[in-house]
Image: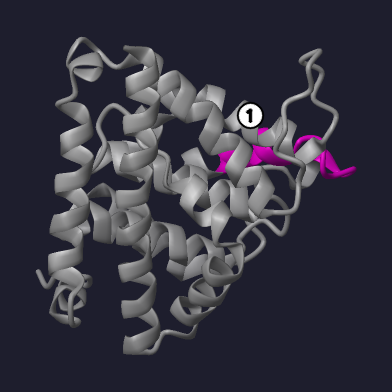
Amino acid sequence: MTDPLRPLLDLDGVAEAAKSAQDAVFAVHRLPANLRGGAETAAEASVRAARASAGIDGANPELPADGAVADPALAGALRVAEALESILPTWRRAPLQALARLHVLAAADLVTDTDVLGRPRAGGPRLELLAQLVTGATSVPGPVLTAVVHGELLALRPFGTADGVVARAAARLSMVATGLDPKALTVPEVAYFRRVPKYLELAGGFEGGTPEGVRAWLLFSCESFEAGAREAKSISAAAG
């Protein structure tokens, strides 16, 4: 059966960028603090990822000193981050169920009609195809599949609320599931947050579907994976 994502590796520079990103992430896993398990790095990475993800959508990413998070988008992103490990097995076998769960967590404080939580209003066949890709219909490297998952969910906006947080959480699950970042140590979300205008521009290019638009998004994603690896190195150094 033909791999629907295989042609992406023929786009100029994509295969090389994916290899470079994977090498950078693997290097983080080999640091002494992470060879011993990496739990401290992963925990801090998870919180930073959630804060940055909420910030991309316009929330204040700062955590209150008293721990009482009032911003509904930040609260949702933190709930998602806390649940990702438990959602991972569902993501591997039933991605659409996992997406529904992510939306329930991300959007609980953002909607008044709770009946819409976890129920896609758009996407249809493309969501089904995305689920097939996640569950084995492609063999492209982890950085490429993760970038496609991320870009597709941003483009589809399947739920109408908290779609950005859901897309970035799904990308994080993909990083783990594909073996790109099996311990979830890196924080590409911080790179996206630092370059929000570029992030949004290139996501729009991916949505447009032209070869150059897709290529630019894939290259940007791989750059962000490398930046996320650098973020993880600083976390690991602090963890000792």
Q: Is residue 179 left or right of residue 195?
A: left
The type of colouring in the image is one colour
For disc 1, the marked residue is: 78
**Magenta-span inclusion, residue 112:** yes
Could you tell whether 170 is left or right of 7 in the image?
right
Q: Amino acid at mark 1?
A: Leu
Q: Is residue 139 visible?
A: no
Tell me the residue at 64%/36% (across/down). Answer: 77
Task: Name the secondary structure under disc 1.
Answer: helix
What residue sits 31% from the left and 12% below the top? 240
On the image, the x and y values in percent for residue 144 come to 26, 61
Callout 1: 10 Å neighbours few (<14), some, many (20+)?
many
Give the residue displayed 23% in from the left and 41% down from the top. Answer: 25
* Picture quadrant of residue 2: bottom left
Quarter occupied by the N terminus:
bottom left
Q: On screen, 85 above or below 147?
A: above
Q: Is residue 79 above or below residue 92?
A: above
Secondary structure mainly formed by the magenta segment: helix
- Can you say whether 101 is above or below 120 in the image? above
The range drawn in magenta is 100-114
Compared with residue 76, is residue 156 higher up or lower down, i.e. above or below?
below
Where does residue 36 sit, x and y in percent of width and height?
20, 10
User: Residue sitting at 48 percent across and 28 percent down?
Assistant: 46
As rendered, which of 148 and 66 lies closer to the eye?
Answer: 66
In depth, the one of 240 and 21 nearer the eye is 240
* Residue 234 placement (x, y as % from top left): 37, 30
Q: Nearer the viewer, residue 211 or 44?
A: 44
Displayed quadrant of residue 20? bottom left
* Res. 9 in view: yes
- Which residue in the rendered view is the most extreme toward the left? 1
